[in-house]
């Protein structure tokens, strides 16, 4: 009858645990396909070092330097080391604790007859204690610490992915500004030639002062854009230098903007995204951690079982203490259980349960954000491609318009203002082309970041590599 009685006692004690409300029902729905039907390349996948797909050594060097020296990444990796150590702290609670105490004592006392005497006591003692994790509370605390560590590792990976994408986008924008500056400086030379020609024609009376002033204004408008572009380039270089962990300064260039090509669009379904993004993994690990904390908090009302063993040696004489001490020991088993705590544990359980609900909603938000970012990137690439077709047609029309206006002006059928207007239209079309090319390259970076940048979760939660998996 002892076994059934013990089982009944365990069940009765288990009923003392606080009550945790159920988790909210999931409202997450995974779409079957992306809204934008992208032109994917068969077999194309996002590689771990996806930035190398642009084929620019300078870009690859910048991203590599950022992943190694960026200040925010160093902070994130230090947090990973901190939470790895906290896993060991939590795991130590499931192990025995052993203490050693030596306390030689010399005492002067009065005997029964009032005569003082001196005694020496030499002793050495050790104490070992161990809590039997009957209900799994200590294991739950260790699981919570492990999941929190994994969440921090995923957070470091997400930070690395974000830094890599920011550096790549910044470099591509820099090359776009470089191309715009080169176009503007070349256009400025043409504007200068046109202004000088208009001045000569005005001086000989062939054209009006209005045409000369219009040519002068067009030259000044173009010249004004040069320092603006140089300032933007200067600031972009400084931003990239800071991202790579250096001081503000110049940035090495690689391929020209026209040589850079966007990598192929990788194939994939929305459901695959759930295992590709480190921020989703972070949200999932946070949910695991809070569930483990909830279990540990709920079980605080349950009794704890502790074993304590004390052993040591003692003697009144040093010679006997060293050679033949007297052995002493004590073994204690203790059961400790709270009787009344003013509903504190239940309120703590309710608080952690509310935190769990927040974490559930945060996970769903992270997944929805991932779906939206990927769909937006796919849509951006498709629309930019359509826009580029229209820009090509616009530029061809502008070029033909300039050719006709130039011939009409040369043959005396039109004023120079007509040619200036055609030049302005062609310049704007050329600037639009460079901007579209830059935006398309940056949209490819956004897509690779939205798809997780080739990130994969490590099967080992105690992996030693910190945050280098963008």
Image (spheres, grey):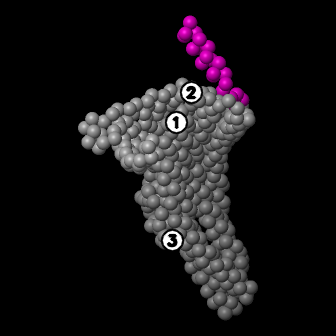
Percent across and percent down for residue 161 are 52, 50
Q: Which mark is residue 142?
A: 1
Q: CA–CA distance between discs 3 and 2?
A: 64 Å
Q: Residue at x 63, y 22 (%)?
A: 14
Among the 4 quarters of the image, the one containing residue 405:
bottom right
Percent across and percent down for residue 18 are 68, 29
Q: CA–CA distance between discs 1 and 2?
A: 22 Å
Query: Toward the viewer: 297 or 247?
Result: 297
> In screen coordinates, is 139 left or right of 123?
right
The mark nearer the N terminus, 3 or 2, is 3
Q: Is residue 2 magenta?
A: yes
Q: Is residue 427 magenta?
A: no
Q: The N terminus appears in which quarter of the rendering?
A: top right
Q: Quick one: SS at disc 1?
A: helix
Q: Residues within 10 Å of mark 3 (few under 14, many from 20)?
A: some
Task: Identify the residue under disc 3.
Answer: 248
Which of the two discs, 1 and 2, sits closer to the camera? 2
Q: CA–CA distance between discs 1 and 3?
A: 44 Å
Query: Toward the viewer: 350 or 207?
Result: 350
Percent across and percent down for residue 259 are 48, 59
- Above or below, 457 against 134 in this view is below
Can the viewer see residue 21?
yes
Q: Which residues are magenta?
A: 1-23
């Amino acid at each position: 009858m002892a076994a059934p009685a013990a089982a009944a006692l365990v069940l009765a004690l288990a009923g003392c645990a606080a009550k945790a409300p159920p988790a909210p029902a999931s409202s997450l729905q995974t779409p079957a396909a992306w809204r934008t039907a992208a032109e994917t390349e068969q077999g194309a996948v996002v590689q771990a070092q996806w930035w190398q797909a642009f084929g620019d050594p300078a870009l690859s060097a910048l991203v590599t330097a950022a992943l190694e020296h960026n200040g925010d990444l160093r902070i994130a990796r230090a947090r990973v080391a901190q939470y790895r150590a906290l896993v060991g702290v939590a795991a130590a609670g499931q192990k025995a604790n052993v203490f050693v105490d030596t306390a030689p004592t010399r005492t002067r006392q009065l005997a029964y007859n009032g005569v003082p005497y001196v005694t020496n006591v030499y002793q050495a003692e050790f104490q070992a204690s161990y809590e039997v994790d009957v209900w799994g509370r200590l294991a739950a605390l260790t699981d919570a610490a492990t999941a929190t560590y994994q969440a921090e590792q995923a957070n470091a990976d997400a930070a690395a992915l974000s830094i890599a994408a920011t550096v790549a986008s910044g470099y591509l924008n820099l090359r776009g500004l470089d191309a715009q500056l080169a176009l503007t400086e070349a256009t400025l030379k043409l504007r200068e030639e046109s202004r000088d020609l208009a001045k000569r024609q005005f001086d000989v009376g062939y054209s009006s002062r209005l045409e000369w002033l219009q040519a002068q204004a067009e030259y000044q408008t173009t010249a004004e854009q040069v320092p603006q572009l140089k300032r933007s380039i200067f600031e972009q270089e400084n931003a990239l230098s800071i991202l790579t962990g250096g001081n503000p300064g110049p940035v090495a260039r690689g391929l020209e903007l026209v040589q850079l090509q966007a990598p192929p669009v990788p194939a994939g379904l929305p459901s695959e995204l759930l295992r590709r993004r480190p921020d989703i993994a972070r949200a999932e690990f946070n949910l695991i951690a809070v569930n483990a904390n909830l279990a540990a908090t709920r079980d605080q009302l349950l009794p704890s079982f502790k074993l304590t063993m004390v052993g040591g040696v003692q003697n009144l004489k040093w010679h006997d203490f060293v050679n033949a001490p007297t052995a002493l020991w004590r073994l204690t088993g203790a059961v400790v259980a709270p009787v009344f705590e003013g509903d504190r544990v239940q309120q703590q359980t309710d608080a952690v349960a509310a935190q769990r609900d927040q974490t559930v909603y945060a996970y769903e938000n992270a997944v929805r954000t991932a779906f939206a970012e990927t769909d937006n990137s796919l849509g951006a690439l498709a629309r930019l491609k359509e826009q580029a077709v229209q820009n090509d047609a616009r530029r061809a029309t502008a070029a033909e318009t300039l050719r006709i206006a130039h011939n009409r002006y040369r043959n005396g059928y039109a004023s120079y203002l007509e040619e200036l207007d055609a030049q302005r239209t062609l310049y704007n079309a050329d600037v639009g082309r460079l901007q579209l090319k830059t935006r398309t390259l940056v949209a490819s970076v956004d897509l690779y970041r939205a798809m997780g940048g080739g990130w994969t979760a490590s099967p080992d939660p105690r992996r030693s590599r910190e945050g280098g998996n963008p």
